[in-house]
Amino acid sequence: MCHLNAFLTLLVVVLSLGTARAQATKTLTGRLLDDRLETVPMANIYAPDTTVIGKTDMEGYFKLDIPRNPNTVLFGAVGMELTTVKLSEECSYLEVILLLSSSYDFMSVRRVNRKESKRFKHLPQLHQEAYEKGLFKSRTPCAFPIFTKWVPRSP
């Protein structure tokens, strides 16, 4: 009976440690700018399931605690493209550039994706410019936006 009690106690301790570790969080801080290198005030920050988990301040800075397991975070604001950023374990300070929303009326899906891809490939150069102007702290981003092709909605 004594061995059974010791085993059950050990089992409870191990399971509670595993649960605590699974719920561990990390602090994510950073700044958002748009592609004109202007601040993005009051932008929403979303979890991968599109639940709002934070906002930027009036200067585009943010600080939030997120679970360790999501590997992406989304950023969005009125007039901006929704941007998905892939997180890395060693990155805790994000500097993200949001693209202004564009309208591509009467263009084929292929042409729209080509234009968006071209704008997306320009982001590293914009990040460098933001660094040189003192708007960002790092020369190169530690997390990168994910380009997703546009797919038309069915009626």
Image (tube, rainbow, N blue to C red):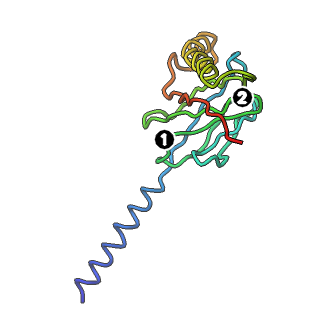
Camera-nearest residue between 148 and 2:
148
Q: Residues within 10 Å of mark 1 (few under 14, many from 20)?
A: few
SS at mark 2 in the image: loop
Q: Write the residue at 64% across / 18% down.
A: 135
Residue 140 vertical position relative to residue 87 in the rendered view, above or below:
above
Provide residue 71's location: percent of width, then percent of height.
48, 41
> Where, quadrant-wise, is the N terminus in this rendering?
bottom left
The quadrant in which residue 83 appears is top right
Q: Write the residue at 64% across / 22% down.
A: 112
**Residue 80, label in figure:** 2
Identified by mark 2, the residue type is: Met
Residue 145 vertical position relative to residue 139 in the rendered view, above or below:
below
* Marks 2 and 1 close (CB-CB < 8 Å): no
Q: Residues within 10 Å of mark 2 (few under 14, many from 20)?
A: some
The quadrant in which residue 99 appears is top right
Provide residue 15's location: percent of width, then percent of height.
37, 67
Label 2 or label 1, whichever lies nearer to me, is: 2
SS at mark 1 in the image: loop
The quadrant in which residue 35 appears is top right
Q: Write the residue at 72% across / 19% down.
A: 38
**Residue 71, label in figure:** 1
Identified by mark 1, the residue type is: Asn
| Residue 143 relative to residue 80: left or right | left
Q: Write the residue at 65% across / 22% down.
A: 108
Camera-nearest residue between 116 and 136:
116
Provide residue 17's location: percent of width, then percent of height.
39, 62
Provide residue 80's location: percent of width, then percent of height.
72, 28
